[in-house]
């Protein structure tokens, strides 16, 4: 690494950062990256809470290794209403022989975990988005020239929001993979 260091040109930024339009673009992109996971999680939350889909039981029949730690799992979903069992895609974190409460998607092609485990797993993605929003107020306040005291409060609040988002994501991931 040190052999290449003389060839690297270091550039020191001049000024306080991007211009007005650059700041607007950065804030819009930051919001997009953090809000889109929340939007994408709506269907999974609806499934996990039972607002959409058909309640029933999922029995994982087989899991095929795709390599590099990835799996393709298939299962049989039996509706609580007593209808005919349906062959569906199961979660890739399943194991053959697993039996769990699930909701069949309206399309009928996959079954998602239901109940507390399903809700916690579905909340992992929105929690990631919330955690990402934690320090956006600080950045905006910095660019607006807010007082040091106000920015310090924004840092403390941002740390709390980011920590809460990280913990929510962690709980959701543990629920999804347990």
Image: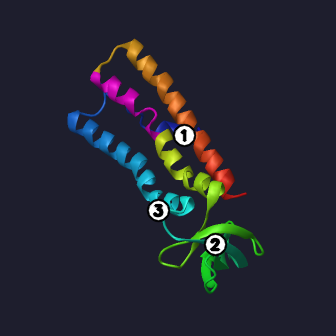
Q: Total number of numbered labels?
A: 3
140 magenta-colored: yes
Question: Which comes sooner in the sequence, label 2 or label 1?
Answer: 2
At mark 3, the secondary structure is: helix
Residue at 34%, 13% in the rendered image:
147
Q: Can residue 105 be seen?
A: yes
The residues colored magenta run: 132-144
Type of secondary structure dominating the magenta stretch? helix
Q: Which residue is mark 3?
A: 43
Q: Can residue 68 be seen?
A: no
Q: Which residue is mark 1?
A: 165
In three-dimensional space, the C-alpha distance between marks 2 and 1, rounded to whole angstroms, equals: 31 Å
Q: Quadrant of the N terminus?
A: top right
Q: Position of residue 156 (x, y in %)?
A: 50, 22
Name the front one of labels 2 and 1. Answer: 2
At mark 2, the secondary structure is: strand
Q: Quadrant of residue 20?
A: top left
In three-dimensional space, the C-alpha distance between marks 1 and 3, rounded to whole angstroms, equals: 20 Å
In the rendering, which numbered label is found on residue 56?
Answer: 2
Residue at 28%, 23% in the rendered image:
144
Question: Which comes sooner in the sequence, label 2 or label 3?
Answer: 3
68 magenta-colored: no
């Amino acid at each position: 690494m040190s052999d290449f260091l003389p060839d690297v040109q270091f550039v020191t930024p001049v000024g306080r950062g991007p211009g007005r339009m650059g700041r607007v673009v950065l804030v819009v992109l930051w919001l997009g990256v953090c809000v889109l996971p929340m939007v994408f999680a709506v269907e999974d939350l609806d499934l996990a809470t039972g607002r959409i889909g058909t309640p029933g039981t999922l029995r994982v029949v087989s899991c095929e290794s795709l390599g590099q730690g990835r799996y393709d799992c298939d299962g049989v979903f039996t509706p609580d209403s007593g209808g005919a069992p349906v062959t569906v895609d199961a979660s890739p974190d399943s194991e053959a022989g697993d039996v769990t409460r699930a909701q069949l998607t309206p399309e009928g092609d996959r079954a998602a975990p239901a109940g507390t485990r399903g809700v916690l797993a579905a909340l992992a993605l929105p929690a990631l988005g919330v955690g990402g929003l934690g320090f956006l107020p600080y950045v905006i306040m910095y660019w607006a020239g807010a007082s040091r005291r106000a920015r310090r409060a924004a840092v403390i609040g941002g740390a709390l929001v980011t920590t809460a988002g990280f913990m929510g994501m962690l709980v959701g991931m543990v629920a999804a993979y347990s």
